[in-house]
């Protein structure tokens, strides 16, 4: 078993070194991206540190193999590593932003209390991904914050990596680590030098198939169960027999994700997904199916290399090396987790979809650093993997608070109709409790709508007009009409299968976006939706002030509402600003459009709304009376 694992670890390292060091794949800078997350977080030093450590590791790893891989392998590994780096960066940024927000909310004096996160890499191999994460946290984020890095693998891999890390600690201080006296033959412990944060690095010798050994090995370092934890598994679970994999997943979820105190924790799985073993009597049903069959059987052949006897079958002995994709499809991952007893929320897509939503468009479209003409094969390769994100109970919609938390929105942009829009944080003086009894400075997040937001949006919409129903029956009729049109939700059965909001899809299909404002989920009551806005493109059938022309494009604002206890605090302004930014970005490449106009219609008796639009520079374009109600249309030229 050890020989096969060592060979696999070395092959993976050489493939990554080939993609990034030999060929020269790079992550795009934020200046070349339209992603608002990268706009906020800026250029991460995580990728820079990864390249630095990859280069330092290369001469110390057994590299008697060819250093340059095929173009398809290079492109596939480049996208895989870039996807994981992007999600790690988002996790670190989320906790840094949360730490800053909490310090600002406590009092006027910044807090000096430290916060702690943990990163655990299963089957870490010889990859410096975890160490690059630790190094980046120490360099980029507040020293008061502590990071604990835990890497787990078999003894032979851990011993090799310990020797590499020790040499790099002594060589020009590439790694600011110092071995501790607590190290044993199964647990190598390092403290981070030069920082007051007491961050640490742990190399654990553990066979992941032996759950009792995993629990025993981790027990000494899991001193705080409520530490937010990011668990990473990159092509690791596929080498575990199904029963061992299920037991490990169940334990990880119950220990790190299901506890009510495990706020801000997540597990990211980048694992093979598809059908590996095909009955001889069963035919190949698609190109993707056939690719999976051949591609996965090659993995098994690699494990079988050097063994005697017939090729391994799915019914082989539990402790012999084997290859088992985590599920037959991304949709089947949820069923696999449920059958394993993992009662947590999971968002799963193919690696192809994850790359598209997570990585800057320039990374996908820039000229590759080597001749490459296997685009169809690359897509099939990416469809052979899935990216699954599992979250703690506090970070997902609950029965009491159906609005999802922020971490799923940040790590899983594919759950929204606009993966490159937000979530975007702003500091405002708003109520910071679910019942809005008190007012304080809090961080509000502007995010594209998710399916679980729809119910809260409908309730906020009705609440905003309910006081007019008795006197103006036409307002109640208009409200009911909207709930069946642009604010209509998926029915319960469809919503379970859909990862996108029906409201969000409605506005996206019309060239717009629907955004919501969220109070952070730092309270026991859970996250709360406190505002919304929709903006859509007016089509050629529109008349009057809404009608677009050959040189003018018109967008209309809809459903701009703010919770009554959060009004006059800047929430509506921030929602409008983010909607305008989306409009401007969407029209950046439209030829012939010389003028962009934004219009909004509201009831004249809603004094707060009319004052808001006038304060934001809108002018009255037309007034009309419908069903004894005075209606005003405001307009503003954006360019």
Image: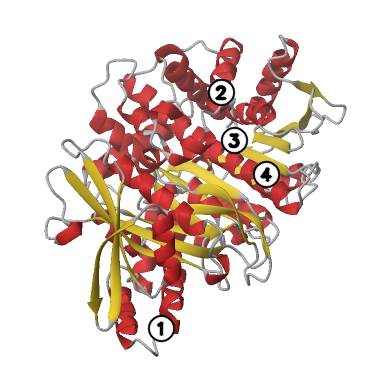
Coloring applied to the structure: secondary structure
Q: Is residue 9 above or below residue 637?
A: above
Decide if residue 593 is in sight here.
yes
- In the rendering, at what x and y percent does residue 563 appear? 51, 69
Residue 472 or 67: which is nearer the viewer?
Answer: 472
Q: Are marks 3 and 2 in contact (CB under 8 Å)?
A: no
List x then y, in percent, for residue 288.
Answer: 26, 42
Identified at 60% across, 13% down, the residue is 56
| Residue 468: mark | 1
Left or right position of 75 against 140? left
Specify the quadrant of the image occupied by residue 192. top right
Looking at the rendered image, the quarter that the N terminus falls into is top right
Helix, strand or loop status at disc 2: helix
CA–CA distance between discs 3 and 4? 33 Å
Query: Is residue 187 shown above or below 177?
Result: below
For the residues labelled 3 and 1, say whether their Cβ atoms are less than 8 Å apart. no
Q: Secondary structure at mark 3?
A: loop
Q: Are marks 4 and 2 in contact (CB under 8 Å)?
A: no
Determine which residue is flagged by label 2. 50
**Closer to the eye: label 3 or 4:** 4
Q: Which mark, by number, is residue 100?
A: 4
Q: Which of pointers 4 and 2 lies earlier in the amino acid sequence?
A: 2
| Mark 3–mark 2 distance (CA, rounded to whole Å) | 18 Å
**Residue at screen point 39% across, 53% down:** 416
Q: Earlier in the sequence, mark 3 or mark 4?
A: 4
Q: Residue at x 63, y 69 (%)?
A: 436
Nearest to viewer (mark 3 / mark 2):
2
Task: Report how far apart the C-alphas of labels 3 and 1 lie in the structure.
Answer: 61 Å
């Amino acid at each position: 078993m050890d020989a096969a694992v060592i060979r696999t670890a070395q092959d993976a390292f050489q493939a990554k070194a080939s993609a990034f060091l030999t060929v020269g794949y790079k992550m795009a800078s934020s200046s070349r991206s339209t992603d608002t997350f990268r706009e906020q977080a800026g250029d991460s030093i995580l990728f820079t540190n990864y390249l630095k450590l990859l280069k330092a590791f290369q001469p110390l790893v057994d590299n008697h193999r060819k250093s340059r891989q095929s173009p398809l392998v290079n492109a596939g590994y480049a996208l895989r590593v870039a996807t994981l780096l992007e999600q790690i960066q988002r996790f670190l940024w989320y906790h840094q932003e949360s730490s800053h927000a909490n310090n600002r909310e406590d009092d006027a004096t910044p807090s000096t209390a430290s916060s702690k996160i943990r990163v655990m890499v299963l089957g870490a191999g010889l990859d410096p991904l975890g160490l690059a994460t630790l190094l980046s946290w120490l360099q980029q984020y507040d020293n008061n914050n502590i990071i604990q890095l835990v890497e787990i693998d078999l003894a032979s891999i851990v011993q090799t990596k310990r020797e590499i890390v020790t040499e790099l600690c002594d060589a020009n201080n590439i790694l600011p680590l110092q071995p501790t006296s607590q190290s044993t033959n199964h647990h190598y412990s390092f403290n981070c030098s030069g920082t007051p944060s007491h961050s640490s690095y742990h190399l654990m010798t553990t066979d992941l198939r032996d759950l009792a050994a995993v629990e025993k090995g981790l027990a000494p370092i899991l001193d705080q169960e409520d530490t937010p934890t990011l668990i990473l598994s990159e092509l690791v679970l596929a080498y575990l027999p199904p029963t061992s994999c299920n037991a490990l997943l169940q334990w990880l979820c119950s220990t790190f994700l299901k506890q009510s105190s495990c706020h801000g924790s997540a597990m990211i799985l980048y694992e093979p997904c598809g059908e590996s073993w095909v009955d001889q009597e069963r035919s190949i049903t698609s190109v993707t199916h056939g690719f999976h069959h051949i591609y996965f059987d090659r993995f098994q052949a690699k494990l079988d290399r050097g063994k005697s006897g017939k090729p391994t079958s799915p019914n082989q002995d539990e402790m012999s090396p084997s290859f088992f994709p985590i599920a037959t499809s991304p949709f089947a991952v949820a069923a696999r987790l449920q059958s394993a007893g993992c009662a947590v929320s999971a968002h799963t897509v193919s690696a192809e979809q994850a790359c598209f939503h997570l990585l800057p468009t320039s990374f996908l479209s820039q000229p590759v650093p080597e001749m490459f003409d296997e685009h169809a094969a690359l897509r099939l390769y990416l469809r052979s993997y899935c990216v699954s994100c599992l979250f703690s109970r506090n970070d997902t919609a609950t029965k009491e608070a159906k609005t999802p938390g922020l971490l799923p929105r940040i790590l899983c942009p594919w759950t929204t109709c606009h993966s490159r829009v937000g979530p975007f944080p702003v500091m405002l003086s708003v109520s910071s409790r679910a019942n809005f009894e008190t007012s304080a400075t809090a961080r509000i997040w502007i995010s594209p709508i998710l399916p679980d937001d729809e119910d809260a949006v409908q309730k906020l919409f009705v609440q905003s007009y309910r006081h007019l129903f008795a006197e103006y029956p036409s307002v109640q009729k208009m409200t009911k009409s909207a709930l069946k049109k642009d604010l209509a939700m998926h029915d319960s059965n469809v919503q379970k299968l859909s990862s996108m909001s029906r409201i969000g899809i409605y506005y996206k299909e019309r060239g717009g976006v629907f955004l919501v404002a969220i109070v952070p989920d730092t309270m026991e009551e859970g996250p709360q939706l406190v505002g919304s806005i929709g903006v859509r493109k007016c089509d050629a059938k529109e008349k009057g002030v809404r009608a677009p022309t050959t040189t003018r494009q018109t967008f209309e604002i809809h459903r701009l509402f703010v919770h009554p206890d959060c009004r006059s605090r800047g929430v509506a302004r921030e929602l409008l600003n983010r909607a305008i930014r989306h409009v401007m970005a969407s029209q950046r490449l439209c030829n012939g459009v010389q003028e962009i106009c934004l219009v909004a219609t509201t009831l004249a008796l809603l004094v707060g709304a009319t004052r808001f639009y006038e304060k934001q520079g809108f002018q009255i374009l037309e007034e009309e009376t419908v069903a004894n109600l005075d209606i005003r249309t405001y307009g503003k030229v954006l360019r």
